[in-house]
Amino acid sequence: MAIPADLQLLADREAIKELTARYARCVVTGDGRGVGALYSEDGRFVAGKFDCIGRANIQDFLEVQTKPGKNMPLVTDHIIEIDGDTASCYSIMFTPWFRHKQPGFCGAYTDKLRKVDGEWYFVERAFEFFEGRPEDS
């Protein structure tokens, strides 16, 4: 039995919010490969001077960059637009510390997503720094 369209839309919105939460959990725990696994095979991650394309490249990059406790990304204010199996999401991110220095930094994610076999993945995740940009970004 098919799920009614309005319920499917709500389920997809929640799945996308959970995807961003899983991303943050992987960052907090230092699981860079886990972060990369949330991207589509052709995914792209852009933040400051970093620009990685392809799930495997993103995983390799984030495995080196992501360390337990390095930062605590708090992601809020999701604005999600869904069109079938594609979506966009804008959200705000703040981390109260970065490399044990306070304050951390803040900015916004602009995401493009794709649903593959019932699961949502980041196709592109671009982060724009607002304040407190780390010196190596």
Image (cartoon, helix red, strand yellow):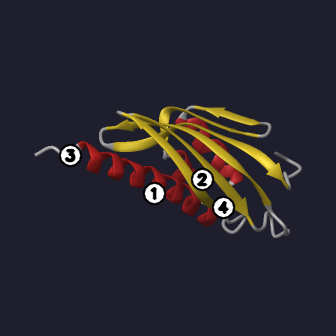
The answer to whether marks 4 and 2 mark residues whose Cβ atoms lie closer than 8 Å is no
> Distance from label 3 to label 2 (Cα)?
36 Å
Horizontal and vertical percent position of residue 106: 76, 56
Residue at 49% across / 45% down in the picture?
80
Residue at the farthest right position: 135
Near mark 3 (Cα within 10 A), the count class, few <14, some 14-19 or many ≥20, is few
In the rendered view, tell whether residue 69 sits above or below residue 24. Answer: below
In the rendered view, tell whether residue 10 sits above or below residue 95. Answer: above
Q: Identify residue for label 2.
A: 32
The answer to whether marks 3 and 1 mark residues whose Cβ atoms lie closer than 8 Å is no
Horizontal and vertical percent position of residue 86: 42, 33
Q: Tell me which numbered mark, 3 or 2, is placed earlier along the sequence.
A: 3
The answer to whether marks 4 and 1 mark residues whose Cβ atoms lie closer than 8 Å is no
Q: Identify residue for label 4.
A: 73
Q: Is residue 79 left or right of residue 120?
A: right
Tell me the amino acid under the disc marked 4.
Pro
The answer to whether marks 3 and 2 mark residues whose Cβ atoms lie closer than 8 Å is no
Q: Identify residue for label 1.
A: 18
Quadrant the C terminus occupies: top right
